[in-house]
Image: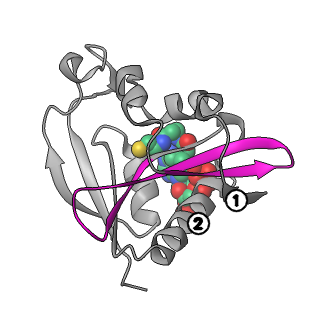
């Protein structure tokens, strides 16, 4: 497996983007932004990470991250986050943020294992008004609130 910058057609990565975000409306708004790294096993793309700018100088966002279901749990996600952190440092990033649903317990564990710390909660970020189906459950918890994580890139 190796990780490299992706310069191809982003729509070819839609199944991966859709794994990371339940709202096609949201995805279509940001899929073309920033830079994308992909994890490849030979010719096959098995994961992706999208890095976008934010309104704050020095702060970059890990906007989308996913690993193909059949390749999860092998360390690919961890390797993608490490590559994103290295990429951000090379581009003078001082802080990396990522957001996920508070309902997604697995993601809460995953990001904290990769060095992120929670910094903010946005209540009712997910719902019909933002393009998410009504009544969606994750791990039995209503998909409703969002947590923002941050990674201080100055820290070791
Ligand atoms: C989240 C995701 C990218 C993790 O990628 P992955 O390749 O499966 O993760 P890794 O194998 O690198 O795991 C790294 C660590 O995170 C843990 N982890 C990963 N997914 C986890 C989960 N769902 N629940 C609990 N722990 C998890 C692993 O156990 C491992 O822990 P360790 O460091 O103690 O060994 C992947 O599960 C995924 O694509 N999920 C669907 C899309 C998604 O939710 N994206 C994030 C949206 S914000």
Q: Dot 1: within a 10 Å radius of its alpha carbon, few (fewer than 14), some, or many (20 or more) residues?
A: many
Residue drawn at x 69%, y 58% as measured from the top left: 4
Q: Which residue is mark 1?
A: 3
Q: Tag 2, which secondary structure?
A: helix
Is residue 52 shown in magenta?
yes
Residue drawn at x 47%, y 66% as measured from the top left: 114
Quadrant assignment for the C terminus: bottom left
Q: How many marks?
A: 2
Left or right, 69 with respect to 101, comes to right
Give the Cα distance between marks 1 and 2: 7 Å
The part of the chain drawn in magenta is: 35-63
Residue drawn at x 37%, y 40% as measured from the top left: 104
Dominant SS type (magenta): strand
> Looking at mark 2, is its residue's CB closer than 8 Å to ligand 1?
no
Residue 30 to residue 56: above or below: above
Residue 43 to residue 57: above or below: above
Q: Quadrant of residue 66?
A: top right
Q: Position of residue 61 (x, y in %)?
A: 36, 56
Residue 140 to residue 39: above or below: above
Q: Quadrant of residue 103?
A: top left
Task: Determine the residue located farthest toward the right in the rendered image.
Answer: 42
Q: Position of residue 26 (x, y in %)?
A: 35, 28
Is residue 46 shown in magenta?
yes
Q: Which residue is mark 2?
A: 83
Q: Position of residue 100 (x, y in %)?
A: 33, 44
Quadrant assignment for the N terminus: bottom right
Left or right, 45 with respect to 122, comes to right
Q: Dot 2: within a 10 Å radius of its alpha carbon, few (fewer than 14), some, or many (20 or more) residues?
A: some
- Image marks 1 and 2: residues in contact by CB distance under 8 Å: yes
């Amino acid at each position: 497996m190796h990780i490299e910058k992706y310069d191809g057609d982003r729509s070819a990565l839609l199944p991966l983007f859709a794994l990371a975000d339940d709202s096609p409306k949201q995805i279509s708004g940001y899929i073309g932004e920033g830079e994308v790294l992909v994890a490849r096993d030979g010719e096959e793309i098995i994961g992706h990470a999208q890095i976008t700018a934010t309104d704050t100088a020095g702060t970059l966002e890990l906007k989308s991250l996913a690993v193909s279901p059949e390749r999860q749990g092998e360390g690919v996600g961890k390797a993608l986050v490490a590559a994103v952190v290295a990429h951000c440092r090379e581009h003078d990033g001082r802080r990396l943020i990522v957001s996920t649903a508070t309902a997604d317990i697995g993601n809460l564990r995953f990001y904290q294992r990769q060095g992120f710390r929670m910094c903010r909660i946005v209540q009712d970020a997910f719902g019909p008004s933002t393009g998410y189906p009504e009544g969606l459950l994750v791990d039995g918890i209503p998909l409703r609130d969002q947590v923002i994580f941050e990674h201080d890139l100055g820290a070791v």
